[in-house]
Image: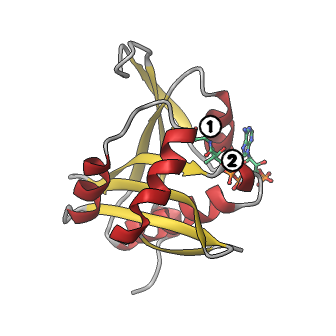
Amino acid sequence: MPMIRPFRVSDTEQVSRISDSSLKEDYDTALFYSIYESWNGLFLVAVEDNMVVGFINGLTEANGLSRILMLAVHNDYRYMGIGSALLDNFVSVLSSRGARKVLLEVRPSNLNAIGFYRKKGFRTAGMIRNFYNDGEDGIRMVRDVTRDKVCR
Ligand SMILES: CC(C)(COP(=O)(O)OP(=O)(O)OC[C@H]1O[C@@H](n2cnc3c(N)ncnc32)[C@H](O)[C@@H]1OP(=O)(O)O)[C@@H](O)C(=O)NCCC(=O)NCCS
């Protein structure tokens, strides 16, 4: 199983490479820093073979809501439980912060991610027109996190 730990600034290059090869959006590294530095941000990485092989980040918002902004696993390390380990850890931390629901948006064309999120307990909660920069709509998916409540 991979080690899941908080993002460090020294991970930026590896995270950026995984993002560029896995996600359609072109994220500036400044965005990684701002999520990392934000008081309500959460940024975790998965380490395997002494390398960062995946990451997840997001924000806790008001009213018990949290949002996943990015989740990606290196192409050579997929279907090994790393995406699940990242998501499960992320949800546990959110739960300990009092989050009740976690939201995300995904492209309708990203059937892989939709399949993954369904397996992980997310359900479709609506469609957002022109959500992405290239005009593609976004599917909003949501999952309750109360069942992941952890003791502090
Ligand atoms: C989506 C992603 C993070 C999944 O990571 P992963 O490490 O391969 O996922 P896991 O190995 O933990 O898989 C967990 C479960 O989801 C299933 N799953 C994974 N990819 C899937 C797919 N493409 N279609 C259907 N189910 C899938 C696995 O079979 C597994 O099911 P199981 O528990 O019954 O065995 C990875 O495919 C990825 O990085 N995709 C590109 C980036 C992306 O699209 N991110 C989401 C943007 S919103």
Q: What element carries label 1?
A: helix
Quadrant, the C terminus? bottom left
Q: Is the residue under label 1 in contact with that under label 2 (CB below 8 Å)?
A: no
Q: Nearer the viewer, residue 115 or 47?
A: 47
Residue at screen point 76% across, 59% down: 80
Q: Does the residue labelled 1 lie within 8 Å of ligand 1?
A: yes
Rate crowding at label 1 as few (under 14), some (14 to 19) or many (20 or more) other CA atoms within 10 Å.
Answer: some
Question: Given the current orientation, which residue lies at the most extreme bottom position?
Answer: 152
Q: Which quadrant of the figure has residue 133?
A: top left
Q: Is residue 92 visible?
A: yes
Element assignment for label 2: helix
For disc 1, the marked residue is 113
Q: Nearer the viewer, mark 2 or mark 1?
A: 2
Amino acid at dot 1:
Ala
Q: How far across and how far down the image is residue 125, in percent?
A: 46, 30
* Residue 64 visible to an observer of this rendering: no
> Disc 2 and disc 1: Cα gap in Å?
13 Å
In primary-sequence order, the first of circles 2 and 1 is: 2
Q: Which mark is residue 75?
A: 2
Residue at the spot 33% in from the left edge and 68% down from the top edge: 9
**Residue 31 in the image, given as x and y percentages of width and height:** 27, 48
Q: Tell me the quadrant of the picture where the N terminus can be found.
A: bottom right
Q: Residue drawn 28% across and 63% down?
A: 36
Check disc 2 and give the amino acid type: Asn
Q: Percent position (x, y) of residue 141?
A: 49, 36
With respect to residue 143, does 130 lie above or below?
above
Disc 2 Cβ-to-ligand 1 distance below 8 Å: yes
Crowding at label 2, few (<14), some or many (≥20) Cα neighbours within 10 Å?
few
